[in-house]
Image (spheres, rainbow, N blue to C red):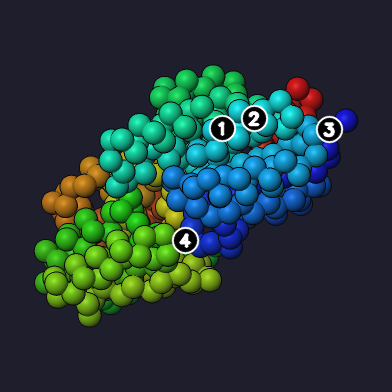
Amino acid sequence: MIESTIYFAYPGDLETQTGGYSYDRRLINELRGLGVEVEALSLPLSSLNPDHQTLNNVQQIFAALPDYAIVIIDGLALGVLDDLAMKEQQRLRLVALCHHPLALETGLNEAQKKTLLASEKKALSFTRATIVTSDHTKQVLIDQFGLPAEKIIAALPGTDSAPFALCDGDPIRLLTVASLTPRKGHDVLIDSLATIKSLNWQARFVGGCHFDSDWAKKLRKQVNTLELSERVHFAGSVDDTQAEYQQADVFVLPSRFEGYGMVFAEALAAGLPVIAARAGAVPQVVPEAAGLLVPPNDTQALTDALRQVLTNEPLRRSLQAGARQAAATLTSWTDTAKLVARKIEEVRKS
């Protein structure tokens, strides 16, 4: 007999303010709303190289689950649990949730990338299905991890409808929403902003520093060194990001890679023009009519895009209109949950 409850495993605190955890929280709630019994399962929070004690603790948690239970495991945990996945593949029905492959995280050396690629590839091979948050990530798993396409379902993050921002700031208010980690490219943005001090803008960086406090300190030092401290405000984590979008004029985030980029969809839902890097799934989220996309790690290209949007009001208004049009095409969370629920039912019957 297959356990009716679905177990949803993730590392650490489900209330952590990142796009990945937000996706997990919302998916759990939406599945419950569809009548699916979901039990949230917190795993010990660890680094990308967990120690023996952490792995032992995780093993005990999984050993306590009933036979044949369906367990959705967030990729932040699963990617380094390859041995556990191999051990439990027959007793449990494992389903992966991959926001983006761990090996594609910014800041890793080649040895770390190689180790994580092998570990995650092995772990994914022992799952019954894999949920990804974009078609781009699906293709990455097919091309680089050897997963069969029929095993993968792309369940794009949903987006709640929201009032459109007025976009009437003076100075123009630039908003960034992202944890302060190297992959998000705040350093590139800061360098770009330093070259356009003469223009009329203020920037607000919303996002926590808990994932990489040393990197966050470097960003603050960079801002101070470039004499931007009165124009770039580090807001930290906030409970209500919707209020941030409503008070902004332009959304800018030059991520070096994105498995999807929920904040881009949220910015579009608020009708904000977007400036971003053409990295990962971003081009699939932000249409040309709504934003300017530049190569990742290209300070000059980002500077040019910022200058265009800040000085060319007709262009800014055109991108704003494009964002409002794009808002009507965004996926709902209910549709996302229905896709996942159907895949869960397939796994249950398999």
Calculate the distance from the C-alpha at mark 4 to the C-alpha at mark 3: 43 Å
CA–CA distance in space, label 3 to label 2? 19 Å
Foreground of the two, 52 or 126: 52
Is 318 or 234 nearer to us in this picture?
234
Furthest residue in direction bottom, as rendered? 230
Count of numbered tags: 4
Under mark 1, the amino acid is Asp
Q: Amino acid at mark 3?
A: Ile
Q: Which residue is mark 3?
A: 2
Residue 43 is left or right of residue 239, and the answer is: right
Sequence-first tag of 3 and 2: 3
Residue 346 at what x, y percent from top left? 73, 27
Separation of marks 3 and 1 at Cα, in angstroms = 23 Å
The answer to whether marks 3 and 1 mark residues whose Cβ atoms lie closer than 8 Å is: no
Q: Earlier in the sequence, mark 1 or mark 4?
A: 1
Looking at marks 2 and 4 on the same chain, the residue that comes earlier in the sequence is marked by 2
Q: Residues within 10 Å of mark 2 (few under 14, many from 20)?
A: few
Q: CA separation, marks 2 and 1?
A: 6 Å
Residue at 28%, 68% in the rendered image? 217
Q: CA distance from mark 2 to mark 4?
A: 46 Å
Numbered disc 4: secondary structure: loop
For mark 1, does the 10 Å Cα neighbourhood hold few (<14), some (14 to 19), or many (20 or more) residues? some
SS at badge 2:
helix
Residue 252 placement (x, y as % from top left): 32, 58
Name the residue that disc number 1 marks. 83
Mark 4 highlights which residue?
Answer: 270
The amino acid type of the residue labelled 4 equals Ala
Evaluate if marks 2 and 1 touch, with contact meaning CB atoms under 8 Å apart. Answer: yes
